[in-house]
Image (cartoon, rainbow, N blue to C red):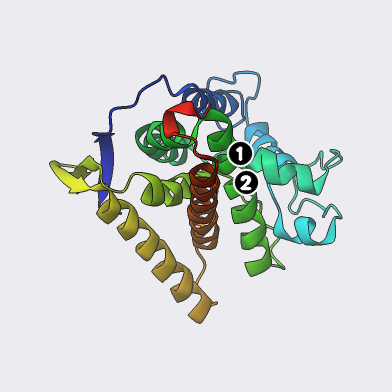
Amino acid sequence: MAGVPLSDDYPVRRVPTVTYLLIAANVAVYLLSPLSMVAFWYGGIDRICDAQRYHFQWGAVPAELLTGRRIAMPGPCPGGDYTKVPWVSALTSMFLHGGAAHLIGNMVYLFVFGPVVEDRLGRLRYLGLYLVSGLVATYGFALTEAGSEIPLVGASGAISGVLGAYLLVQHRSRVITLVFLVIPVRLPGWALVGTYFVLQYFLYISLSLYPGEDSSVAYAAHVYGFIAGAVGALLMHRVRWRSGTRPSDVY
């Protein structure tokens, strides 16, 4: 997107504990990983191999998710004798990132939109939606790239689910957005989030039509995660409406 969200004008009624904990977990995992210079116990030329092993061990490899069998780590790096449960990696991969820019970009979106969705759905439902959206995004991407042996890492699929839920539960908000990283503009939430989905879907379809083009961004995961979040939020609202529960009663 050409804009970076800065804040939402929805008056959150309680501290977004789950959102803050998710952000803290993502940051902590990155700082302890071989990609962070803070993790001084990784050092020298071996850091590259450590990072590769780290992503293969904890990242979600499509070929492993669909077969249930671990693949051999390619390349000259030694130490590929780690143990791994493929389905568990679908969860752990949601807390890994490929670099500081990747982490910051994801956390900005979670920081702006997460508190709103958490407040509207309740903490437990919000956490469930986040995790389920991430799993749907991961397995959806695995089905799209069935033969891929490249680890999928990042919270983008789960955060896309948060955006999908936001479109359903609080699309009337306005979001201050930094357009082209320079100009602050007040935009309708539905326009910003809707544009995100359209762009991700367009890029996903473009790569599907031209499979020879490689991309380091898992657009398919973003699309599946967004749809899962929107459907999940819709179902939660229907259940709440039938039970007569108000948003403020849900924790």
- Point out the residue furthest to the bottom here: 209
User: In the image, what residue occupies the spot 37% across and 51% down?
Assistant: 167
Question: Crowdedness of circle 2 by 10 Å Cα count: few (<14), some, many (20+)?
Answer: many
Spot occupied by residue 108 in the image (x, y as percentages of width and height): 37, 35
Residue 31 versus residue 85 in the image, above or below: above
- In the rendered structure, which amino acid carries the disc numbered 2? Val
Given residues 15 and 103, the one toward you in this image is 15
Classify the position of the N terminus by image quarter: bottom left
Q: Secondary structure at mark 1?
A: helix
Can residue 52 be seen in the rendering of this structure?
Answer: no
Most foreground residue, 242 or 11: 242
Q: Which residue is at a point 82% across and 53% down the rendered structure image?
A: 72
Q: SS of the residue at dot 2? A: helix
Q: Is residue 115 left or right of residue 186?
A: right
**For residue 194, side relative to residue 102 (left or right):** left
Q: Residue at x 59, y 27 (%)?
A: 29
Residue 74 seen from this side: yes
At x 49%, y 35%, the residue is 245
State which quadrant residue 106 falls in: top left
Residue 133, given in percent of the width and then of the height, sits at 58, 49
Q: Taking 243 as reference, is 68 above or below it?
A: below
Identify residue for label 1.
Answer: 128
Please give the residue where the numbered disc 2 appears in the rendered image.
Answer: 132
Q: Is 188 above or below relative to 30?
A: below
Q: CA distance from mark 1 to mark 2?
A: 6 Å
Task: Say which of 51 and 100 sits in front.
Answer: 100
Q: Position of residue 236 (x, y in %)?
A: 53, 46
Image mark count = 2
The amino acid type of the residue labelled 1 equals Gly
